[in-house]
Image (cartoon, helix red, strand yellow):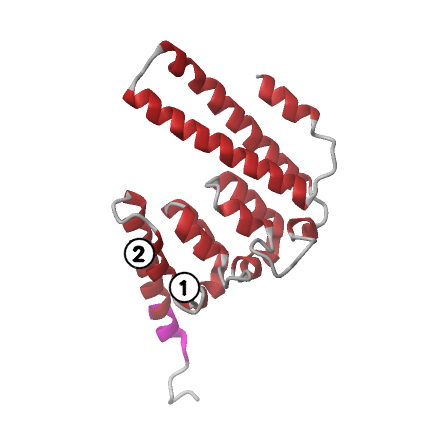
Amino acid sequence: SAASDVYKRQGNKPVTFDSLRQKIHEFGNLRDTEKASSCAVASASTPETTSTQPALSAAAQALEDNIVNDINRITDIDTLNDPSNTDSTYPNLLHFAIQYGSTNIVSAIISRLGECAPEIAAMPNKYRETPLHIAVQYGDAHMVDLILNTLGENALHTLKSTRNSRFTAVALAKTSRDKNDPHTKAIVNLLKKRTKLLETCLLYTSPSPRDS
């Protein structure tokens, strides 16, 4: 496709935090346009609106593939950190990418972060939001599960930590999302089950008073 050819020609350009952020934002805009078009097609299907759907999907797919390729080309993981301000809304690209809903892009970032991924996944931004909090607000259950799995040993602490000193991840899901959104119930259930499982594991792995 024309979109795919454009991104292929950009393949040799240096990868920077800003270039990745710009492409991910563009990807989000394409996804939003695609969703809006899908709603329009569902309510009033015409040859004109129907014919635009494959092109939009191809453009979003081409850009997603290009972003993943760029992430895989990174030689220094510091490229994934915001160079202008570490105390920002998006101190790492992981914080930024989650809100746009692509588990492929987020998985690529996590993979590139390697052993640093659990630490970054637990990193709060200036609003005390970790990537988990952002996933709870903007993502679906698959994205939340991906971040929980990335957190590893940090998962329980992050689940119980608060956003702006007010909300745990579960409370945030209940207050920031549409209660009629099917993803909301799935996310809340996932968070509760994971918290209970981790607390149970902690209970059985903690030394007893007799052992101390």
Q: Position of residue 103 (x, y in %)?
A: 48, 41
Category of crowding for the residue at label 1, using alpha-carbon neighbours closer than 10 angstroms: few (below 14), some (14–19), many (at least 20): many
On-image quarter of the C terminus: bottom left
Q: Which secondary structure class fits the magenta region best?
A: helix
- Of callouts 2 and 1, the N-terminal one: 1
Image point 63% across, 35% down: which residue?
Answer: 69
Look at label 1 and name its amino acid: Leu
Look at label 2 and name its amino acid: Lys
Inspect the magenta stretch and tell me whether residue 77 lies in it.
no
Magenta extent: 200-206
Residue 45 visible in the current orientation: yes
Q: Nearer the viewer, residue 206 or 31?
A: 31
Q: Position of residue 114 (x, y in %)?
A: 61, 53
Image point 40% across, 52% down: which residue?
Answer: 136
Q: Which mark is residue 159?
A: 1
Above or below residue 131? Residue 18 is above
Image point 59% across, 21% down: which residue?
Answer: 3
Q: Which mark is residue 87?
A: none
